[in-house]
Image (cartoon, coloured by chain):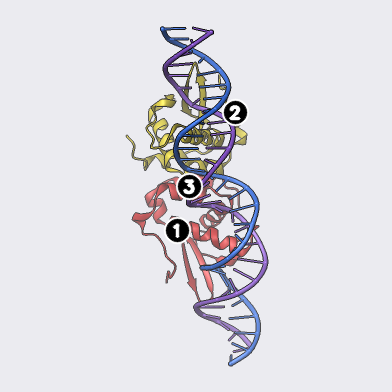
Chain colours: A yellow, B red, C purple, D blue
DNA sequence: AATATTGTTCGATATATGTCGAACAATGTT
DNA sequence: AACATTGTTCGACATATATCGAACAATATT
């Protein structure tokens, strides 16, 4: 189901996670995902960049281990990886407190 | 006392803070500072890069608002800015849980 | 089979970043 | 005044990053 390459939990590193979060667009995506508490369709993100760039950011989040990224039919769906909270408890919570974005 | 430029608390942004933390060397420095719970002399950091590079990283941490950086005599001293915990409660705590570095 | 939809990848470009050694500046020491 | 210490800044370089439009691939629809 998850045809795209995802890092194993043990391969996820804190610095990569933080670097992935250290970009406004990616932080927005993660914030959106966290609030949704469920998968969100690729197309539902309102960002101010083209789809090639959005694809690039989503790939970074995936390779950092922050999100799941799967394709179903001709659409893609994204969701937060729960392993992040297991690995870094409280991290997303503290980060998301400050991400306006309702 | 703090001759070097530091951002005001209101100028500190989450993405810049996260980006600053998203580098192994800078994360080490912050980890060291957090464990010390006091100022640490510039020269006391054991990093695997030259002093020009260390200076660069320290500047990034300062400009991101993470640390205080002051000069006293011919030495510099660094300390964590307490405003970070006020702005992003729990962030450093969750980050530092995973930074080995006794 | 031809077309439409949904993203990814590619090539190009501009900017940022991490790194170093050398020069510089500020201070303290002799 | 000359020297030593402590970092910063500069110039150079290599690599990474963000961005775009266009080409491509996979799937679904007609």
Residue B58's x, y, as percent? 52, 60
Judge depth for marks 2 and 3 and give the one in front: 2
Disc 2 target residue: A5
Same chain for the residues at labels 1 and 2, yes or no? Answer: no
Number of numbered discs overlaid on the protein picture: 3
Q: Label 3's element?
A: helix
* Chain letter of disc 1 in the image: B
Residues at marks 2 and 3 touching, judged by CB atoms closer than 8 Å? no
Q: Label 1's element?
A: helix
For the residues labelled 1 and 2, the Cα–Cα distance comes to: 35 Å
For the residues labelled 3 and 1, the Cα–Cα distance comes to: 21 Å
| Residue A27 against residue B63 in the figure, above or below | above
In the image, which disc is placed on residue A1?
A: none
Disc 3 target residue: B93
Would you call the spot at circle 1 few (<14 residues within 10 Å), some (14-19), or many (20 or more)? many
Would you call the spot at circle 3 few (<14 residues within 10 Å), some (14-19), or many (20 or more)? some
Residue A10's x, y, as percent? 62, 34
Residues at marks 1 and 2 touching, judged by CB atoms closer than 8 Å? no
In the image, which disc is placed on residue B63?
A: 1
Judge depth for marks 3 and 1 and give the one in front: 1
For the residues labelled 2 and 3, the Cα–Cα distance comes to: 31 Å
| Residue A45 against residue C12 in the figure, above or below | above
Q: Residue at x 55, y 49 (%)?
A: B23
Q: Residue at x 52, y 23 (%)?
A: A70
Residue B17's x, y, as percent? 45, 50
* Chain letter of disc 3 in the image: B
Q: Residue at x 40, y 35 (%)?
A: A31
Would you call the spot at circle 2 few (<14 residues within 10 Å), some (14-19), or many (20 or more)? few
Q: Residue at x 43, y 70 (%)?
A: B3
Residue A16's x, y, as percent? 55, 42
Same chain for the residues at labels 3 and 1, yes or no? Answer: yes
């Amino acid at each position: 189901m998850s045809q795209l390459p995802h890092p194993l939990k043990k391969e996820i590193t804190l610095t990569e996670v933080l670097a992935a979060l250290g970009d406004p667009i990616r932080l927005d995506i993660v914030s959106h995902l966290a609030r949704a508490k469920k998968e969100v369709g690729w197309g539902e993100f309102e960002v101010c960049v083209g789809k090639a760039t959005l694809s690039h950011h989503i790939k970074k989040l995936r390779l950092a281990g922050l999100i799941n990224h799967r394709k179903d039919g001709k659409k893609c769906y994204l969701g937060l990886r729960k392993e992040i909270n297991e690995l870094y408890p409280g991290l997303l919570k503290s980060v998301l407190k400050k991400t306006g974005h309702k």
